[in-house]
Image: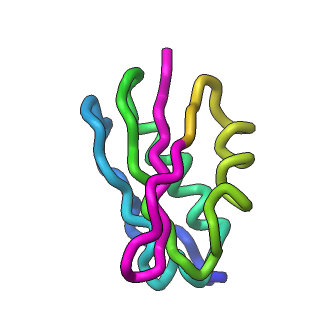
């Protein structure tokens, strides 16, 4: 785990009213699954209704549906998930839609 997540650059710096991608596959993400979950939540917080965000997660943690999706469902209403594909680098892409 990373020693201090406050030192990790946020995945979003503004709200997004269009669909976008959040890079959650940096070395600090590989070392800290909790950081992946928290920054995925931040990415969803930055979304506008009717859009989606592609969460690109590090392959070190395996399939995101096994550790990420339940955490996000517990934190947000009206989400839909679509597993897109595994990246050539080993990471995984999940498309998260915010309905409502």
Residue at (57, 64) in percent of width and height: 36
Q: Nearer the viewer, residue 27 or 8?
A: 27
* Residue 61 on the magenta segment: no
Q: Main secondary structure of the magenta part?
A: strand
Q: Where is residue 6 in the image (x, y as percent from the top left)?
A: 51, 68
Q: Quadrant of residue 35?
A: bottom right
Q: Is 14 rendered above or below residue 94?
A: above
| Quarter of the image where one finds residue 53 | top left
Q: In this view, does 71 lie above or below 24?
A: above
**Residue toward you, 32 or 5:** 32
**Does 88 sit left or right of 37 as displayed?**
left
Residue 97 shown in magenta: yes
Residue at the image point whose x is 59% and y is 56% from the top: 38
Is residue 29 shown above or below 65? below
Q: Which residue is depicted at the point 56% across and 33% down? A: 80
Q: What stretch is highlighted in magenta?
A: 82-100
């Amino acid at each position: 785990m990373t020693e201090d997540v406050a030192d990790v650059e946020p995945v979003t710096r503004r709200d997004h009213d269009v669909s976008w991608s959040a890079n959650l596959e940096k070395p600090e993400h590989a070392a800290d699954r909790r950081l992946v979950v928290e920054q995925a939540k931040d990415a969803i917080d930055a979304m506008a209704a009717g859009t989606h965000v592609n969460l690109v997660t590090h392959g070190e943690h395996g399939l995101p549906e096994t550790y990420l999706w339940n955490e996000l469902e517990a934190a947000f209403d009206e989400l839909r998930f679509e597993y897109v594909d595994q990246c050539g680098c080993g990471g995984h892409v999940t498309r998260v839609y915010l309905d409502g």
